[in-house]
Amino acid sequence: MKRRHFIGTVLAAGIPGARAASARVTRQTTTLQPCTFQRLPDTLAGMSLQQLRDDYRDRLFNRYLPFWDKGGYDKQLGGFMCELNDDGSVFSDEKYIWYQGRGIWVYSFLYNNFGRDPRFLKIAEKSKDFMVGHMYAGNGKWFEKVRRDGTVMEGGVGKVVYGWLFAAAGLCEFYKATRDQKVLALAKESIWSAVRAYDDPDYAHGDVTHIGVETPKKGLRFQGHSMVLIRILSQLLSYHDDPRLEKLQREQVKLVMNKFWNPEYGIVNECLQHDYSRIPGTEAHMFAGHSLETQWMIMVDALRTKDRVLFRKAKDRVRRLLEICWDYLFEGWADEDFFAVDTPEHRRGPTYEIKTMWAQCEVLVACMMILEYTGEVWAKEWYERARAFTLRTMPVEGHGVWRQAVDRRGKNIKREGISSKRKGNFHQPRMMMLNLLSLERMIANRDKCTPFP
């Protein structure tokens, strides 16, 4: 991005990049006066919209998916093995529930949105059969890890409900493709089982002791749980009517927008007490990646429910979070811990030491969506800046699956607690697919914003 374009963006936001982290905020981005294109720009990221669309199609269909066919997808038994060498060969035969549900979602979404290629549906179906046949533990619960042949590994049923919800996400998208009522019933059972477990005061997921604050060990509420529920339900409710799930969705959106959101600092607290009150000592802390990701998912739901006010509020929050967490020295979005004030353990502002691939992808999804529906100039500028950083740092030469994370200067780095062999089968293809669909609509609209429903 040209420097003069970037300066214009920051000044228009009313949130100077160098000072935003230190100020307590009483009035948020609702006061912004957006600058919008009269017609969508002819170019984006240095290409015409048609060229950018073709670039993503090439990256997805000619680079990313062929790599996954080398070993990540188990052609014999179904399912996904995500610990791979850079040449695509299998490093470990572990099959993890997160990546089974996510993989089923990816290939079902490919089938539903990109030509209904029966090969994609076959991969999704075979993986669904493996997951249900070997990883379902009954009563809506799922085993966390199995071997390639389905043998349950140590740990048994997952204690954290993310895996149950990702299984449900894959089943929901597969149901859209097939209208198999048994699949829908299992998806719903998994959703409600996860909700019941999460609502139990004894539910133990984690805490935020890494920021120097002691928190309860059980019963905490996490934005990430609401995030996954919101995304699953937004998609399912767009093609399936269920008043009870609709009520759950409305509750989760309100929790993110009104409870997790902290108006004192203009950030989102990732972790709250069981009654959704703030945890003393954590009020100024944010896990930035989930915060921005959740806001674009709420924008999608606002489109579904035709709620312009909600869309604008989530859109403005995306802008604020993007601007206060950007690394203005080395580029890239600092998507881990953010501190609104100085503490004895941490300086105020973003934590720059690691920048994850998945979170850079979420920035690209959010900015493309905002450009498509609003034509706001800042969304184009930030999209181009984020895409340039992502393409400069995340791709690995020789194959289409990007690295997990980089350090502040853009060099490869291992994520703590995650195997260096782990390859991502979700965030990268999801970003490319959602960007492709946006670009197709923008091209079809002949340089005009996609109309709000």
Image (cartoon, helix red, strand yellow):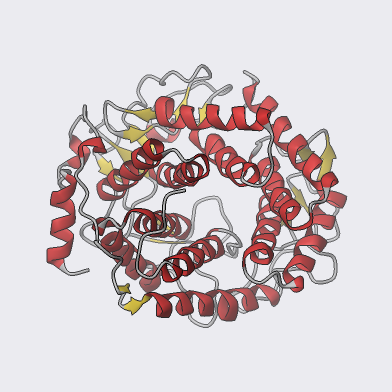
125 shown above or below 26: below
Q: Can residue 156 be seen in the rendering of this structure? A: no
Quarter holding residue 333: bottom left
Q: How many marks?
A: 0
Q: Residue at x 83, y 39 (%)?
A: 137
Residue 41 shown left or right of residue 24 in the figure: right
Q: Nearer the viewer, residue 156 or 21?
A: 21
Nearer-the-camera pick, 435 or 346: 435
The quarter of the picture where residue 79 lies is bottom right
Q: Is residue 309 above or below residue 36?
A: above
Quadrant where the N terminus sits is: bottom left
98 left or right of 221 in image: right
Q: Is residue 447 above or below residue 29?
A: below
Residue 304: image x %, image y %? 52, 44
- Up-down: is 168 above or below 58? above
Q: Position of residue 229 (x, y in %)?
A: 59, 38
Position in image of residue 359 (x %, y %):
44, 54
- Tell me if I can see residue 173 in this picture: yes
**Residue in front for this viewpoint, 229 or 176:** 176
Residue visible at 12% across and 65% down in the picture: 4
- Residue 251, image x, y percentages: 54, 26
